[in-house]
Amino acid sequence: MSEGVDYSDNVLSALVCVGLPLPPPSARQDALLEYYTKKFDRNRAWKYASLQPAVNSILQALGRPIRKKEDRAIIVLLEKRLLENRVSRCMPEMQKMQTSNPSRTAERVNSFFQM
């Protein structure tokens, strides 16, 4: 529900993204990787053909609950790979709270809603 839907009046107060939506293997994806590899190099080819489009999809979803400066929402990204340097460099700077403990995550979400 991240693309083509507008949630106005701060109707969304929470958003959870699960996973990194990397494109599945296909002939098209192979051709795109081959094109970028010839044009640049293998690392940048993967970034341009696979990683950045996946990050862009996440960024698109992040913009759904926050449409104007008065809007407020908690965003939970359930994907460990977002912490990897090669992925986090593709993301904008944002306030992050990292936890791998489910009860600690629940505490942080509850404290957000009590603010």
Image (cartoon, grey):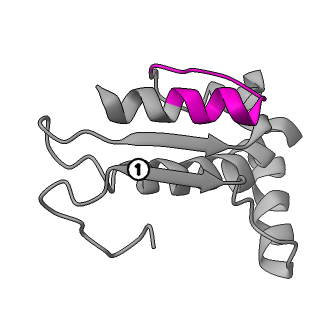
- Span of residues in magenta: 95-108
The picture places residue 63, in percent across and down from the top left corner, at: 34, 50
- At a point 33% along the width and 57% down the height, the residue shown is 64
Rendering quarter of residue 91:
top right
Which residue is at the far bottom?
27
Left of 9 or right of it: where is 81? right
Left of 87 or right of it: where is 13? left
* Up/down of 10 relative to 41, above or below: below
Front one among 68 and 35: 68
Number of marks present in the image shown: 1
* Up/down of 58 relative to 104, above or below: below
Left of 54 or right of it: where is 67? left
Front one among 110 and 60: 110
- At a point 81% along the width and 58% down the height, the residue shown is 33
- At a point 45% along the width and 73% down the height, the residue shown is 1
- Badge 1 crowding class, 10 Å Cα cut-off, few under 14, some 14 to 19, many 20 or more, is some
The picture places residue 23, in percent across and down from the top left corner, at: 75, 66
Rendering quarter of residue 89:
top right
Rendering quarter of residue 60:
bottom left
Q: Is residue 38 magenta?
A: no
Query: Which amino acid does the dot numbered 1 rest on?
Result: Ala
- At a point 24% along the width and 69% down the height, the residue shown is 6
The picture places residue 4, in percent across and down from the top left corner, at: 34, 76
* Residue position marked by numbered label 1 in the rendering: 14
* Up/down of 19 relative to 80, above or below: below
